[in-house]
Amino acid sequence: MVPLSAYVAVSAVLFTTGVIGVLIRRNFIIVLMAVEIMLNAANLNLVAFSHYLDSMAGQIVALFVIAVAGGEAAVGLAIIIVVFRGKISTNVDENLLKW
């Protein structure tokens, strides 16, 4: 049986990778992928603690987080497609609200 600390360590590595991706990179697609990595790290923690505590609540919340992340990814990618079609830079530092 895998100890809980192993799941928490993997989740911490994933979350740190996501935070670094959000802070370092300036491309919207990379930032969106980094946010998804952070959400997956939170889901891993939810499922691991749910299993450790013999409760289904964490797994149910993880399913809701996955559904919200899917919607967020769809909306985010739609916005990125609109930006690419408008030939506007996808750099996060630039103001994309000015058309």
Image (cartoon, rainbow, N blue to C red):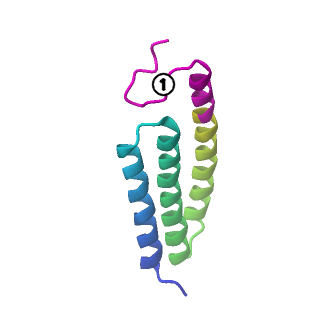
Give the residue at mark 1.
89
Residue 91 drawn above or below residue 73: above
Residue 83 drawn above or below residue 18: above
Provide the major secondary structure of the magenta segment.
loop
Q: Residue at x 37, y 29 (%)?
A: 93
Quarter assignment of residue 81:
top right
**What amino acid is labelled 1 in the image?**
Ser
Residue 29 coordinates in the image, percent (x, y): 53, 39
Q: Is the residue marked by circle 1 packed among few (<14), some (14-19), or many (20+) residues within 10 Å?
A: some
| Residue 48 colored in magenta in the image | no
Residue 21 coordinates in the image, percent (x, y): 41, 49
Residue 97 coordinates in the image, percent (x, y): 46, 17
In the image, the segment drawn in magenta is 77-99
Q: Residue at x 50, y 12 (%)?
A: 99
Q: Residue at x 42, y 31 (%)?
A: 92
Residue 87 drawn above or below residue 34: above
**Mark 1 secondary-structure assignment:** loop
